[in-house]
Image: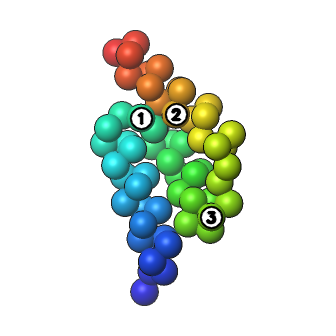
Amino acid sequence: MEAPSQTLATKIVARLIQEKLLAPEAAKKLEPLLAEGKLRAEDWRLPIELGVGKEEKT
């Protein structure tokens, strides 16, 4: 059974991908850290900027 923090991290990352704010490749790296509570604002910045930038170019 998944821990509640892992379930929440999975839902958050899935929503960010759905909203095209985060690339799936970046999500794979961030999800475990999010579940463990080890992400800082700096950890989100580049993946979100790249996800948004990728969407704007297409």
User: Badge 1 local density, few (<14 within 10 Å), some, or many (20+)?
Assistant: some
Dot 1 corresponds to which residue?
A: 21
Q: Nearer the viewer, mark 1 or mark 3?
A: 3
Residue in front for this viewpoint, 29 or 43: 43
Q: Residue furthest bottom?
A: 1
**Label ID, residue 52:** none
Query: Who's the residue at 43% across and 86% down the image?
Result: 1
| Residue 49 vertical position relative to residue 10 in the rendered view, above or below | above
Dot 2 corresponds to which residue?
A: 48
Query: Who's the residue at 55% across and 66% down the image?
Result: 35
Dot 3 corresponds to which residue?
A: 37
Q: Are marks 1 and 2 in contact (CB under 8 Å)?
A: yes
Q: Are marks 1 and 3 in contact (CB under 8 Å)?
A: no
Identify the secondary structure beneath mark 2: helix
Query: Who's the residue at 43% across and 52% down the image?
Result: 13
| Residue 55 vertical position relative to residue 12 in the rendered view, above or below | above
Identify the secondary structure beneath mark 1: loop
Q: Quadrant of residue 44?
A: top right
Which label's residue is closer to the chain start, 1 or 3?
Answer: 1
Residue 15 can be seen in this image? yes
Q: How many marks?
A: 3
Task: Report the Cα–Cα distance between label 1 and label 2.
Answer: 6 Å
Residue 32 can be seen in this image? no
Q: Amino acid at mark 2?
A: Ile
Q: Amino acid at mark 3?
A: Gly
Q: Residue furthest top?
A: 57
The reply, left or right, for residue 21 in relation to residue 40 is: left
The reply, left or right, for residue 29 in relation to residue 7 is: right
Task: Report the Cα–Cα distance between label 1 and label 3.
Answer: 20 Å
Q: Where in the figure is residue 9, as x and y percent of width and height? A: 47, 62
